[in-house]
Image (spheres, rainbow, N blue to C red):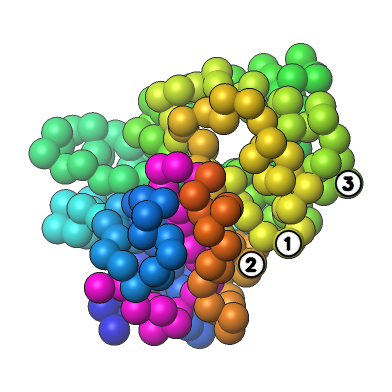
Amino acid sequence: STKCYFCQLVFKNQIQHHSKPVPSIYINWTAAQLSNMTSTAKLSALGFCGADDSVNPRLLALIGQNYPLVEFGVLFRPDKEGQPRYATKNWVSNLSNLLSKNSNTKVRLAAHLCGSYVNDFLSYGANDSAKETIDLFLKQLHDWGFRRVQVNATAVNGVFTENLAYDLTIHSFLSAVRSYPELEFIVQKNEETSPLWSGLLKAKDMPENMVFLHDESKGTGKEVAEGWPTDPTFVATSKKIVGFAGVSYFSHLIR
C-alpha cells in the first residue's frame, strides 16, 4: 500500500524493528460526527515516525512537498541519540537548514519527546533546572521548524511514570503547554498514561494548543487489534484534533 511504501522508502531502520509499520493519523472531528464513526471527517495529517541519520533529508523534503498531509515525527531521547530511529541534533539541524533554504517546501515536523525530556517536561512547574532545559529545547525545536510536540510519557519510552497522577505533574504539563502557544502539544492517550490525561481533562480552560492521540501501542508501532477507540466523551473533549496510532487503516472506514 502507499503508506507502507513510504515507510519502507524513508525509514529503513524502522522496518528492521516492525514488519508492518503503522502510521499515525490526525483527524478533525466535530462532536456531531462522533455518534456515527463513518461520518465524513477531515484528515489533518498522516504521521510517520522514526526519521534518523540514515535518511536523506532531501528525500523528506521531496515527499513533504508532494504529499502535504505527511507529518514526519522525529524521536528525541538523549540516551539513544544517534541510534536507529533516534536522529542526532546535527542531522535535525541539517534538515532544518535544507528546508529553510526553500521557502516553497512546507514540510510538517513533529518532535516526539522521550526519556529525560519528558521527565523534565513533567517537572516544568516544580524544578528550575527542568524548566530551563525544556525552555531551551522547545525554543530550539521551534527554530528548527517543528510545530507539534508529542509527549510520550510511558515506561517503554524511558519515562518515570510513578508521578503521572500528581497535581504538580498536571500543573507542570499545563504550564509548559501554555508557555508555548506557538506549538501544539500532543498527549499520548493509553491505559498507562490514564492518570495524566484524565487529570488534564479535568483542567479548567484546557489549552487550545493541546490535543490527544489514541495510542495503546505506546509508540512502538504495533497494530492494535481492537481498532479505534469510540469514547464520544473523550473525543468530544479534545475539541480540535484527535489522533489515532497503531490502528490498521482497514479497522474502520472513513468516507
Q: Name the mark on residue 191.
A: 1
Examine the rendered structure and indicate whether residue 208 appears above or below residue 30: above
Q: Name the mark on residue 216.
A: 2
Left of 245 or right of it: where is 3?
Answer: left
| Residues at marks 3 and 2, CA–CA distance in whole angstroms | 18 Å
Asked whether 122 falls inside the magenta stretch, the response is no
The extreme right residue here reads 162
Examine the rendered structure and indicate whether residue 67 appears above or below residue 249: above
Q: Quadrant of residue 122?
A: top right
- Which residue sits at x=53%, y=67%? 230
Query: Which range of residues does the magenta coloring cover?
Result: 238-255
Q: Main secondary structure of the magenta part?
A: loop
Residue type at the position of mark 2: Glu
Left of 203 or right of it: where is 20?
Answer: left
Mark 2 and mark 1 in contact (Cβ < 8 Å)?
A: yes
Mark positioned earlier in the residue sequence (1 or 2): 1
- Which residue sits at x=27%, y=57%? 42
Q: Is residue 193 visible?
A: yes
Residue type at the position of mark 3: Glu
Task: Please give the residue where the numbered disc 3 appears in the rendered image.
Answer: 162
Near-viewer residue (248 or 15): 248
Q: Residues within 10 Å of mark 3 (few under 14, many from 20)?
A: few
